[in-house]
Image (cartoon, rainbow, N blue to C red):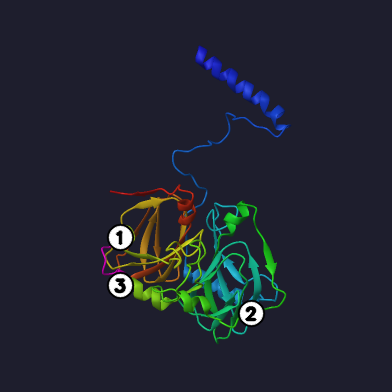
Amino acid sequence: MTGTAAQAADDTAARLRLRDELARSGLKIAQPDDPPLFTRVPESSMRPMHWRWAELEAFLQELGQVLDLRPGGDRRTLRLANPGLEYGTTPTFWASIQYINPGEVATAHRHTPDAFRFVMYGNGCRTTIDGENYSMSEGDLVLTPNWAWHDHLHHGDEPMIWLDVLDVSLIRKLDNTFFDPYPEDVQPVGEQPEKSWREFGSGLLRPVGAAPAPRHNPLLVYSREQADAALELAKGLDPDPCDDVILEYQNPAGGGPALPSMSMKMQVLRPGFQGVTHRHSGSKVYWVVEGAGTSFVGDERFDWGKGDFVAVPPWSPVRHVNDHDTEAKLFRVDDSPLYRTLNIYHEEIAR
């Protein structure tokens, strides 16, 4: 055995000998069998996933028939669970599909995780968020910021389905989960039930006076009509090489993401689009609003259609293609704001 090899063997033996002794005092040193503390690029246990709407819809209809939505109970949700993770859809957030029948009430509560609802199908529900009351219609994005009281009451004639996303995976990792049920099923509606919309809903003008703190989003609802109009305008710009036409829902008080930990985006892939492969820090989930296309995630190919979901792990290469003769529209949520806030966001685009 060479001198170098002998030294390495002695070092390994010393580390193993010290392991148990140090452990009794709540201490550790690096061991030969430890997983690497640093990796050249991010390595995630999250797996790429594709959930098809035909299967999801069948499960949702069954849940709507057999599960009650009782006062004070859990919401009726179908969770998009990632088999590579102990908890959640991605390492930082959980996406679920909520199903609510006519006449039902999702009772009021509040919690530390930030949340939003993107209405997938149906109309007629109204939500109250800290006293402000809004209708929820297909294609609307509705925010429920952390520690805001919120409840939902369905006045319509047909079941409604929406996407629920909460940064609960992140909050659990931070050991900062707080939850309060409201003392009544629903909270009272304030004297100005659409206050934030009337102040900031135009997206162009705001009330005169001191602006809200940039980190606090004063707006609670983003309508489908405004999002569609903005996308139509953006089609006249140069296409994004990776995402074609893509826009982000912004906080009107400073222009940042709509929520501090999550960015919501809408994009259109036009017929014939062949996207460039790219990857970036953080995870993301897509929901197909309409149309069809293909996403290549790492070594996997997902041919998706209307209603499907696709999940992309952190730093996974992804490429979008639309070989069809109609546009595809996608809603996307990602956790990029976390990485940008910490100044650790990385992105790589194939050249």
Name the kind of residue labelled 2 in the image: Val
Above or below, 87 relative to 264: above
In the image, taking residue 330 as reference, residue 35 lies left or right, namely right
Q: Secondary structure at mark 3?
A: helix
Q: Position of residue 216 (x, y in %)?
A: 52, 64
Circle nearer the N terminus (2, 3): 2
CB-based contact (under 8 Å), mark 2 and mark 3: no
Which label lies toward us, 1 or 3? 3
User: Is residue 236 highlighted in magenta?
Assistant: yes
Report the residue at 67% width, 32% height from top: 27
Q: Position of residue 340 (x, y in %)?
A: 45, 52
Report the residue at 31% width, 69% height from top: 234
What is the chief secondary structure element of the magenta stretch? loop
CB-based contact (under 8 Å), mark 1 and mark 3: no
Circle nearer the N terminus (1, 3): 3
Name the kind of residue labelled 1 in the image: Asp
Q: Secondary structure at mark 2?
A: strand
Which label was assigned to residue 149?
Answer: none
Which label was assigned to residue 240?
Answer: 1
Which label was assigned to residue 233?
Answer: 3
Q: Which residue is mark 2?
A: 105
Above or below, 87 relative to 210: above
Q: Where are the magenta residues, as a range?
A: 232-239
Mark 3 nearby-residue class (10 Å; few <14, some 14–19, many ≥20)? few
Q: Is residue 159 in view?
A: no
